[in-house]
Amino acid sequence: MRQTFHIAVVSLCLLASCQNTLDLYPLAQPSAETWYSNETEIQLALNDLYRGNFWAQDEDLDPNYLSDDGFYRQTLTPIKAGTTTSQWATSTALWTNSYKAIARANKIIEALNSDQTKAKVLPAKIELYNAEARFHRAAQYAVLVTHFGDVIYSDGVVSIEEAYTKGRTDKKIVIAKAFEDFDFAAKFLPLSYPVSAVKRVTKGAAYALKARLALYTGDFRTAADAAKACMDLKAYTLHADYSNLFLQTTKNSPEIVFGIPRSIALKVVIGTAMVSDRLTRNSGGFGAANPTWDLFCAYLCTDGLTIDKSPLYDPRNPFKNRDPRCTATIVEFGITHLGFVYDPNPYAVKVLRLSTNTQVNNNDNRVNAQFASYNGLVWKKGIDDSWLLNGRTIEPDQIVVRYADVLLMYAEAKMELNEIDQSVMDAVNSVRARAYKVALSATSSYPAITTTNQAELRRAIRMERRMELAAEGLRYMDIIRWKLAGKVLNKPIYGMLDPADLKTKVVDKNLWFFPGTPTIDADGIPDFKALEDAGLIKNLVPCTWNDRQYLWPIPTAEIQINPNITQNTGY
């Protein structure tokens, strides 16, 4: 059975904001005493919990990127600069939005349990709507505890006065409560919805996000069991073609376990600024937000080896013989992209424009445009010619969790439990086989993972997650929970030399594109230091990590208005 997720893009603001960003109780509501009196009003209230800003993934929170997968020219987030404070806007926004959603979910749950609502709504529907609201509440607490640690917990509506006195609850208690909510949701939510019906969260979504919370917090048994429960529903399959899964024309894929739809008609879209940052300069964009060389080097070769170990890798032609997800994620040099041949070579001052079949100035070349991609790489994942239409407003589904992630979570959790069996190998290899567009059993057509050694399999699964989930907002929490942030965010972001030096030191010496092959360490991280020391690449901007950032700071406003809220260490 195929399960997709879709909901009418309708939102109703039930709670007005107030000075306390915890926002546990509304100062104003439409018809506060009579609202939730029928199913339509309840559904409208639930719709508000599907706002896109309640479901933003980490890389969506800051255009300058939180992880080592991407960067924005020479601009750093406070995370990468090691300068986060309790006034960091990103941290404050996440805290505020999560608590707004929790407050609204709590109000819905309270109303559903009232005599007024029970008198007008069938008991089965009461259970269903309770399950939906509890799913949303659990998901928001999951985000809070994984970013802030101990947080303020409430599963009911409280007064402003009480909100000012509540302290932080041990994260273990919050996690247990979230698991209870996810379990309730999984029990009463449907497996799927009729094709003609508006579709909302399902059992699969509850299991998948429970697995994510458990994995992020090191509860591998719960993670494995929840991921397996999602798999056992037989409701999801991997999309046949990885490269078009993320296009805005792909809707209702059987791989999407939970996502938020967008709609140009209803003006729920990705903003034009973010779109322009990812579009090439030839096509009229800025080419400012780019994949890092660290990500580019993480893609294995088609023999399953890293670039420093594989005889198939050629630094002069670095896109060849690579895992197919490499060129599905990053634009290969010399191919047509958004109507132009993409070529950042400093000698390629002209390129072909397909629509006119003429040579035009190459603005994706730093000789012609100093703000073209600083490392030569631009994003391709999810980007096609349709991004240039409709005034650069686009409507790809906002994917929260998909089946490939569920399979990889299952494989990782079972590996960490050292319960490595055929189900683990099948889970991770299914994801890899799909990338090569072959069946799981076609092991001669893709580099299947065969090791059952725990340490080797850990490395393989982590590499697989990076290749599979790049640019989906999940890398940041991976490097946090694996305690790799201190390594990967404490090294420079590298790029190409300035055009004159690039010509004489790299291109004229037949060293284009990579003037050497970086070594890849046991964590899959490339080391570019030798190339930097040789003067063949440029240190664009150094990053500085501070270990206090493994937890984000509680916003200043919360500390100031409530003496019972303590700050995380180091802030």
Image (cartoon, rainbow, N blue to C red):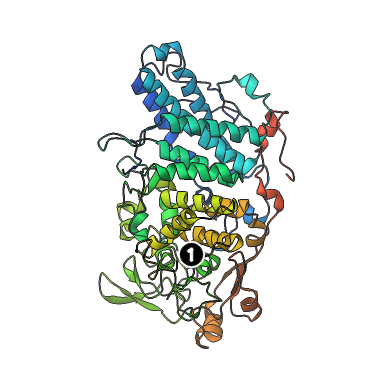
Compared with residue 353, is residue 13 higher up or lower down, i.e. above or below? above
- The residue shown at (27%, 35%) is 194
In this rendering, does residue 16 appear at all? no
Q: On the image, numbered disc 1 is attached to which residue?
A: 449
Going by the image, does 401 lie left or right of 220? Answer: left
Q: Amino acid at mark 1?
A: Ile
The N terminus - image quarter: top left
Compared with residue 166, is residue 421 higher up or lower down, i.e. above or below? below
Q: Nearer the viewer, residue 214 or 444?
A: 444
| Residue 393 screen position, x and y as percent | 35, 50
- The residue shown at (63%, 53%) is 79
| Residue 498 screen position, x and y as percent | 55, 76
The C terminus - image quarter: top right
Determine the residue located farthest toward the right in the rendered image: 570
Q: Nearer the viewer, residue 133 or 232?
A: 232
Compared with residue 275, is residue 352 higher up or lower down, i.e. above or below? below
| Residue 61 screen position, x and y as percent | 53, 47
What kind of element bears circle 1? loop
| Residue 308 screen position, x and y as percent | 56, 76
- The residue shown at (36%, 66%) is 442
Q: Nearer the viewer, residue 498 or 296?
A: 296
